[in-house]
Amino acid sequence: MDVLVSVGMYLRTIRRRNKDGSVVEYLQLAHNVRRPNGVVCAEVVHNFGRADQVDREALHRLARSLHRLDEGEGLDAGLVVQRSRPLGGAHVLHHLWEQLGIAGQLQELLREREFESDVERVLFALVANRCLSPSSKLGACEWVAQDVAIQGLEQLEVQQAYRAMDFLLENQEEVQERVFFQVAELLQLEVDLIFFDTTSSYFEMEGEDEEEGLRRFGYSRDGRPDRAQVAIGLAVTKEGIPVRCWVFPGNTADASTVERVKQDLHGWKLDRVVLVADRGMSSKENLQLLRQDGGQYIIGERMRSGVPVVEEALSRAGRYRLLQDNLEVKEVVVGSGRKAQRYVICRNPEEAERDRARRELLLQELEQALLELDQTAVHQRRACALRISRRFGKYVRQLPDGRLVMNREVVVREERLDGKYLIHTSDQQLSTEEVALGYRQLLQVERGWRDLKQELELRPMFHRKEDRIRAHVLLCFLGLLLIRVAENRTQQAWPRIRRELQRLVLVDLSGPAGQVSQTSKPSSAQTQLFEALQVPAPIRVRAASSSRQPEAA
């Protein structure tokens, strides 16, 4: 080996002997790095190729310029900045994408297909766009070309994006299943409890699809009843790692999603799954469905439902036991033998005090409104408004003579529910504590919805075709998987991680000696993130070339 420049960033030549005995020289850009064990060794930054096919003198000048730049001499090294693009976020997401096996699974599925573009790279770019700078698919193409450094992808056309989305949707069942089991094995996830909930996401459009379409009017959790929407289901583990997502027509009721969810998860043949869901899933039909084939559930109950078994559970006497975080629990079994049903009543004294204070303030306002009401007027508008009011209506009672008074019976019933919620479970193996704390972890799903809508900007949607809508949700789902793994490893929120990583940039430089793409030096905070995320720091020089090529022989 012939070392041409012996310090800092330098150019070196390596020789390889062919079978016929001839020797070929190759030029490399290298620099010295110190390993954790203290040993200093050469690290190849860039391969220029065969020495007889490049301009050796130009590369010498480029190496010297880079060396001076690396030593802190700045742009006096003769290099001029052409552009600068954030690199850190895409670099980390790329390595997580690889570590979690998403890239490998996609490449395996693509093996039998022929695409002109690199579909795996395109899908990664679309997912990274949701995580780092959410935009439309057309905006994502511009982002790839101008505003980010995506490894293996310099340009992206919108039709390439749509073809990649179509491929993802065609294989969505297999992709989600393969990725989940890969992630579960890698992260050693506990999948005995699977948390499920639904939300809605609206469109910027007038009207709705026909009966068979996805975009329908329904109960809007986004406060946009004027917009058509889709309903989305999300399942996560107790660690908050997304398991699977579903897309339903916008007018789908929560309760009617359970059969599809149970069927799909049952097809994965998980050893033992207890589905944890909120009150909207607690219909009698759903509970019977969940118990089929040995299935188990932890599900919230509507305490004001008037269902006899629920009323009996709430009226049972017993002593509460204090768990963690000021949570008190009491287990109640209603019925006997095969008809016995297990309930857990949870109470938070601090929340009970807040409920009491809020109700007292509301009742004071209601009492004042009743005093100011002219009870002698017939069909008075203000009286009708009180009776149908969402705030006051349940506390108002109309006497036979038409007068309105405060309903004290309702006040008493509400007092006994302060700070409480009721859980119903079919599982007899879980302890009371596991049931109570497991249900409370439904907050992980709510957190997932918040991140999908705020950080990944799931909505509003602008897609028109059903397939594109489903693919868009799946891209956001994969983005949520990446950012949740990043958060769990660093114990930091994604906005903070993203903000710090995006400060590490890739700078394109050019000068008389040639062109080079070099990263900024990682800060101590960025280095700590790389270590926590188990991701290597990016190499300093990503690409380099001399300013001119030798004349052809």
Image (cartoon, rainbow, N blue to C red):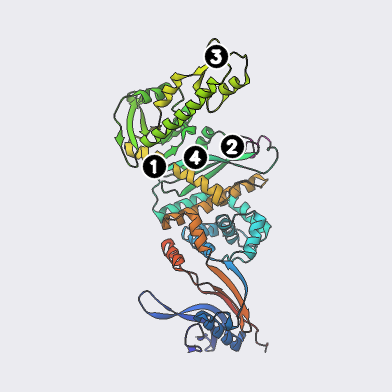
* Residue that appears at 35% across and 42% down: 325
- Mark 4 or 3, closer to the camera: 3
> Hey, what amino acid is under mark 2?
Ser
Residue stretch in magenta? 210-226
Q: Which mark is residue 403?
A: 3
Mark 4 or mark 1: whose residue is earlier in sequence = 4
SS assignment at label 1 = loop
Quarter holding the C terminus? bottom right
Check disc 4 and report the residue beneath it: 197
Q: Which residue is mark 1?
A: 272
Q: Residues within 10 Å of mark 2 (few under 14, many from 20)?
A: many
Image position of 252 (left or right of 482): right
Q: Whole-Å distance between the Cαs marked 3 and 2? A: 36 Å
Residue 487 in the image: state x and y as whole percent.
45, 55
Q: Residue at x 33, y 42 (%)?
A: 324
Q: Is residue 310 above or below residue 90?
A: above
**Image spot of residue 224 (x, y percent):** 62, 38
Q: CA distance from mark 4 to mark 3?
A: 43 Å
